[in-house]
Amino acid sequence: MPGPRPGSNAYDVERARLRKRIENSGRANDKEADEAANRYLREEQQRPGFVRGERGLGPKGERGRGEPK
């Protein structure tokens, strides 16, 4: 599934965790770590989600013809 949406609390928490991990690895300074974390989360937003079964397809009454029952 795609990650949290930008501006949400979950997005900010995830970005802070990523920043800290990048900074502690010694590969980047503060500004570079922030940019790298933002870039990673933006790329994650582009990834499509997936359905883990029929339940994720919605109620049977809302499914169109030809869709799994």
Image (cartoon, rainbow, N blue to C red):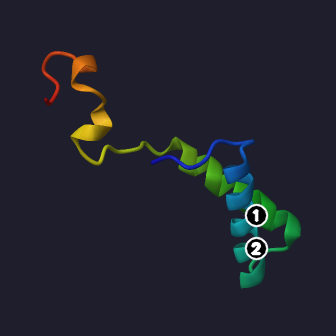
Residue 26 appearing in the image: no
Q: Residue at x 42, y 42 (%)?
A: 48
Residue 30 appearing in the image: yes
- In the image, 61: left or right of 29? left
Q: Which residue is mark 2?
A: 20
Q: Secondary structure at mark 1?
A: helix
Q: Residue at x 79, y 74 (%)?
A: 28
- In the image, 60: left or right of 37? left
The answer to the question of whether label 2 and label 1 lie on touching residues, with beta carbons closer than 8 A, is yes
Given the image, on which type of amino acid does mark 2 rest? Lys
Question: Of the numbered discs in the image, which one, if any, rests on residue 31?
Answer: none
In the rendered image, the vertical position of residue 42 relative to residue 31, given as above or below = above
Q: Residue at x 85, y 73 (%)?
A: 29
Q: Quadrant of the C terminus?
A: top left
Q: Which residue is mark 1?
A: 16
Given the image, on which type of amino acid does mark 1 rest? Ala
Q: Position of residue 37 (x, y in %)?
A: 71, 60
Q: Secondary structure at mark 2?
A: helix
- In the image, 15: left or right of 58? right
Q: Position of residue 39 (x, y in %)?
A: 68, 53
Q: Quadrant of residue 18?
A: bottom right
In the rendered image, the vertical position of residue 40 relative to residue 64, given as above or below = below
**Crowd band around label 2 with a 10 angstrom C-alpha radius: few (<14), some (14–19), many (20+):** some
